């Protein structure tokens, strides 16, 4: 059942919202798979690839360059997603990694 709504839009809409069910109060977010683009890649896998890319860089790459490298590997993510996962993994931005 397709509604042509961005995953990030749905994520923001359900953030901080709960359902009262016979089994207790559940986060709406827990009903989603955590898969990237509805595909077979988990967000943890993509975050791991970002860690590997930043660990092996000779000079710090921007989020746009990281997204391009992931794209070459068949992983289609936005620059915003790279930024979110990089931040979640505690990886500083390219300017701070230079120092």
Image (cartoon, rainbow, N blue to C red):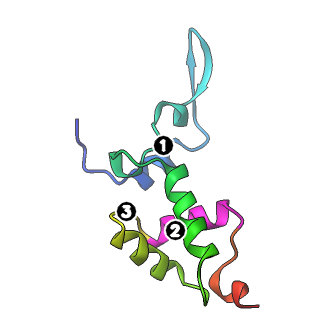
Q: How busy is the neighbourhood of tag 2: few (under 14 within 10 Å), some, or many (20 plus)? A: many
Q: Position of residue 95 (x, y in %)?
A: 67, 89
Q: Is residue 22 above or below residue 32?
A: above
Q: Secondary structure at mark 3?
A: loop
Residue drawn 40% across the image and 64% down it: 77
Q: Residue at x 61, y 90 (%)?
A: 59
Cβ–Cβ under 8 Å for marks 1 and 3: no
Which numbered disc flags the more N-terminal residue, 1 or 2?
A: 1
Which mark, residue 21?
A: none
Cα–Cα gap, marks 1 and 2: 15 Å
Report the number of discs. Answer: 3
Is the residue marked by circle 3 packed among few (<14), some (14-19), or many (20+) residues within 10 Å?
A: some
Which residue, given by chain and number where applicable, does mark 2 sit on? 82
Asked whether 88 falls inside the magenta stretch, the response is yes
CB under 8 Å between discs 3 and 2:
no
Residue appearing at x 54%, y 84% in the figure: 62
The numbered mark, 1 or 3, whose residue comes first in the sequence reads 1
How far, Cα to Cα, is label 3 from label 2? Answer: 11 Å
Give the residue number, with chain letter if any, for mark 1.
34
Q: Dot 1 lies on which element? A: loop
The circle on residue 75 is 3
């Amino acid at each position: 059942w397709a509604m042509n709504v961005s995953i990030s839009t749905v994520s923001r809409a359900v953030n901080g919202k709960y359902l009262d069910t016979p089994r207790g109060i559940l986060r709406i977010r827990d009903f989603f798979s955590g898969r990237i683009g509805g595909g077979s890649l988990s967000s943890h896998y993509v975050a791991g690839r970002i860690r590997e890319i930043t660990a092996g860089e000779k000079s710090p790459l921007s989020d746009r360059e990281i997204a391009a490298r992931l794209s070459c590997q068949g992983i289609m993510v936005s620059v915003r997603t790279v930024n979110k996962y990089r931040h979640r993994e505690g990886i500083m931005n390219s300017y701070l990694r230079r120092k």
